[in-house]
């Protein structure tokens, strides 16, 4: 406690100095027009009507592709650390959770699908929809922590990589047909973006559930 | 007149939201109990998504509520449960040796 008595005023002083310097720097920033105008100019070629989705899936598709790859790598590195141990949760007694989930999971699936679909014209998208689907999967896992049947290793791996590989395949096809890497032919852009978002939301949902479970299941072995 | 009242109400709401965010952040970082911190973190994520709505960024608000509050909260809770189990196993072994 003696150490704390001496260090905390110093930490407070340094934090306040840093905060003050940050405020000064932010106040000095010159006004920036931002990228809203260039995005608005290119919207008619993006294939979607929502500017955020146009930036994420079309203009800056490369960044989103890398995000999906990072999520995939996160699960793979957790798998490489060891086998999965049971979730630290007891099986829930009584009918309330199971009865609620029977009604809640269809609603979550519809909501997640709607969020993916509405992403082309309004707020929503693969990450939000995938997170809702993933939350439904986590609830399902919690309701049956001991006897939840898992899909085979091949299905888990395919589902995990579906989003990143669909994105990469479409991006490479764009390169080969002369629209540049991660570029789409404008006439097809809407359908390609929707397909990528659907694949990505499945992968994101599966990623979140597998992150929650932690470790590789006994059905996923090295070298197979 | 009603327009002015709405403006003042919104300013008050924003100020309250900002202060609550800072307060919750302080409590969750300063508290010693990890479970309490995780629960406060989930509450912080939900309040932060409200702040994103007030900044008219509904896309970020949706992502924050679903991923920042929901899924991260579940991940932190399950990690905490696993940590406690590891701790129990460790202390039991230590107790057996001495």
Image (tube, grey):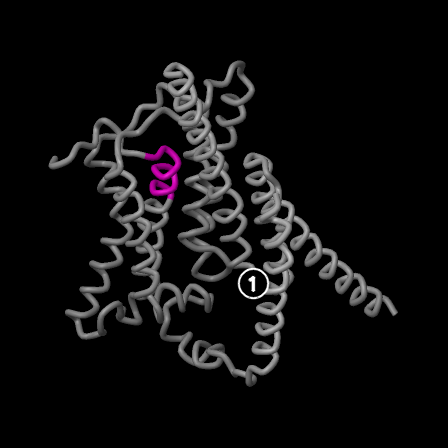
Q: Which residue is mark 1?
A: B57
Q: Quadrant of residue A62?
A: bottom left
Asked if residue A221 is positioned above or below residue B24 in the image, the reply reads above
Main SS of the magenta part reads helix
Q: Position of residue B46 (x, y in %)?
A: 60, 48
For image coordinates 63% across by 58% down, the residue present is B51
Instruction: Left or right? Give the position of A107 relative to A216.
Output: right
Q: Quadrant of residue A94?
A: top right
For image coordinates 71% across by 61% down, the residue present is B14
Q: Position of residue A120 (x, y in %)?
A: 43, 60
Q: Position of residue A16 (x, y in %)?
A: 63, 66
Asked if residue A128 is positioned above or below residue A57 in the image, the reply reads above
- From the viewer's side, name the closer residue of A5 and B32: A5
Q: Which stretch is magenta?
A: A205-214
- From the viewer's side, name the closer residue of A47 and A40: A40
The residue sitting at the left extreme is: A223
Asked if residue A142 is positioned above or below residue B57 in the image, the reply reads above
**Which chain does the numbered disc 1 sit on?**
B
- From the viewer's side, name the closer residue of A123 and B67: B67
Q: Count the labels in the image.
A: 1
Q: Is A211 one of the magenta-colored residues?
A: yes
Q: Position of residue A121 (x, y in %)?
A: 47, 62
Instruction: Left or right? Give the position of B5 relative to A216.
Output: right
The residue sitting at the right extreme is: B1
The residue sitting at the bottom extreme is: A30
Q: Quadrant of the C terminus of chain B?
A: top left
Instruction: Left or right? Give the position of B71 relative to A215.
Output: right
- From the viewer's side, name the closer residue of B20 and A203: B20
Q: Quadrant of the N terminus of chain B?
A: bottom right
Q: Is B60 one of the magenta-colored residues?
A: no
């Amino acid at each position: 406690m003696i150490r704390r008595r001496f260090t905390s005023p110093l930490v407070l002083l340094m934090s306040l100095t840093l905060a003050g310097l940050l405020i000064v720097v932010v106040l000095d920033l010159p006004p920036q027009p931002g990228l809203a105008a260039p995005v608005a100019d290119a919207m008619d070629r993006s294939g979607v009507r929502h500017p955020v989705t146009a930036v994420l899936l079309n203009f800056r598709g490369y960044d989103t592709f890398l995000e999906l790859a990072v999520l995939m790598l996160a699960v793979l590195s957790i798998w490489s650390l060891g086998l999965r141990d049971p979730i630290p949760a007891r099986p829930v007694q009584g009918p309330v959770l199971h009865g609620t989930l029977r009604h809640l999971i269809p609603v979550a699936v519809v909501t997640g699908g709607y969020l993916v679909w509405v992403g082309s014209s309004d707020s929503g998208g693969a990450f939000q929809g995938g997170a809702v689907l993933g939350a439904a999967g986590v609830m399902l896992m919690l309701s049956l922590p001991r006897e939840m049947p898992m899909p085979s290793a091949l299905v888990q791996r395919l589902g995990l990589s579906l989003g990143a590989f669909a994105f990469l395949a479409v991006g490479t096809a764009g390169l080969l047909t002369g629209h540049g890497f991660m570029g789409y032919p404008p006439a097809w852009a809407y359908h390609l973006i929707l397909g990528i978002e659907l694949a990505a939301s499945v992968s994101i949902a599966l990623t979140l559930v597998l992150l929650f479970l932690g470790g590789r299941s006994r059905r996923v072995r090295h070298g197979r | 007149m009603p327009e002015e009242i709405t403006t003042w109400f919104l300013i008050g709401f924003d100020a309250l939201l900002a202060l609550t965010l800072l307060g919750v952040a302080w409590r969750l970082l300063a508290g010693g109990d990890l479970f309490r911190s995780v629960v406060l973190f989930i509450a912080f994520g939900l309040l932060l998504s409200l702040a994103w709505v007030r900044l008219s960024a509904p896309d970020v608000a949706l992502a924050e509520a679903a991923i920042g509050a929901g899924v991260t909260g579940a991940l932190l809770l399950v990690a905490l449960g696993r940590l406690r189990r590891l701790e129990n196993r460790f202390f039991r072994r230590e107790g057996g040796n001495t």
